[in-house]
Image: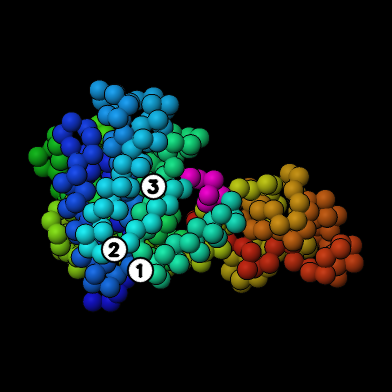
Amino acid sequence: MKKERVVIKIGSSSLTADGGGLSRSKLLEFVEAASALHQDGHQVVLISSGAVAAGFSGLKYPTRPVTLAGKQAAAAVGQGRLMQAYTEAFRHYQIETGQILLTRDNFSNKSQYQNAYSTLTELLQRGVLPIINENDSIAVDELTFGDNDMLSALVGGLIHAECLMIITDINGIYDANPSTDPNAKRYHFLSEIEDEQFEQAGGSGSAVGTGGMKSKLQAAKTGLSLGLRAFIGKAEGPSSFQDILAGKGDGTYIGFPGRFVLNSKKQWLALHSLPAGELIVDDGARTALLQKGRSLLPAGILEVHGRFEKASVVEVKDNRGNLIGKGQVNMSADEIKDIKGKSSQEAVERTETQRAEVIHRDEWVPSEKERK
């Protein structure tokens, strides 16, 4: 079997005991399965929930807290416990682990995004198994990534993984709720995720997790667009991850990977960068950007909205208001206003830059709708 880079996301519901605390036996079972995959020569990255579940009992909460402050306090206590349990368990298989805590800010900040890529790449090349969780204790928005589902897809795209496994306590995606509808049928394979699957998905199925099936579907869909194939389902037994990789998993397989695969720089532009303004372009510029693979020149710009400086990210829309993509500009908003509609030669003469392109094609990415 071809050696692959695999991202495995394990949800809270798969790691907790009946009383709501961390289940050591379940954790050990997942570690054994991940170790088998690692020892087969695959590079494994673990995205693990469970910090809140591992920590709330230490704060003398009778059940999982429901307030943001309670969850963040529980995560502060539980993250250390969770990582200690993983480190000790993987040490039994002579596998070194490394912990990384991430928030949305780490993805929207370009330098932090690049640093995350460099760190993860170095760890994998050194044979280390990274264990990643959202930094719940300081996250501004409550469990921003949706119980780590979206985080797992974004990490998979960041490191150019081939396979994303989203492990949960439900064995796949159904066309109805299997808990209430005895005629519900499971999808064994989906080539892509349609609106129909989102409509059929319910909410969170567990008292200890926050990400329901819609969250997992959205993560899988994002993963496909980043070049991963995905699996959503159960994992039980020491060979479970090997079985999933071999096509024998208890769940739903999704994809072929998306045809339009974004490199790391363009992933950051498309998914994480925060636009500081927008440019309205004419039909000629729209065609040049989307169909001819060219840069955005001043002649095609009709309007400039917002105040931004050189190297800012802006949205680009056509003259009907449709978003067609995002890009990093080579000049400020004031400079672009001064040269919009003009020829490239005039633009060079009127600006300090020697480059006529407002957005170079290497700093441009079309919107998701236009990538299809």
- Residue segment shown in magenta: 103-108
Name which quarter of the figure residue 137 lies in: top left
Q: Which residue is mark 1?
A: 127
Lower position in the chain sequence, tag 1 or tag 2: 2
Type of amino acid at the residue the image marks with label 2: Ile
Distance, label 1 to label 2, CA atoms, is 8 Å
Lower position in the chain sequence, tag 3 or tag 2: 2
Please indicate whether residue 310 sits to the left or right of residue 34 in the image. right
Q: Which residue is mark 3?
A: 133
Q: Quadrant of the N terminus?
A: bottom left
Type of amino acid at the residue the image marks with label 1: Gly
- Which residue occupies the extreme right position in the image? 349
Residue at image location 36% in from the left, 32% down from the top: 74
Judge by depth and name the residue closer to the eye, 39 or 49: 39
Judge by depth and name the residue closer to the eye, 164 or 80: 80
Q: Is residue 328 above or below residue 53?
A: below
> Do the CB atoms of the residues marked 1 and 2 lie less than 8 Å apart?
yes
Residue at image location 31% in from the left, 47% down from the top: 84
Type of amino acid at the residue the image marks with label 3: Asn
Q: Which residue is mark 2?
A: 95
Judge by depth and name the residue closer to the eye, 166 or 31: 31
Give percent across and percent down for residue 161: 38, 65
> Do the CB atoms of the residues marked 3 and 2 lie less than 8 Å apart?
no
Give percent across and percent down for residue 320: 64, 49
Mark 3 or mark 2, whichever is nearer to me:
2
Q: Residue 104 lies in magenta, yes or no? A: yes
Q: Is residue 57 above or below residue 329?
A: above
Residue at image location 42% in from the left, 44% down from the top: 134
Applied colour scheme: rainbow
Give percent across and percent down for residue 159: 43, 64
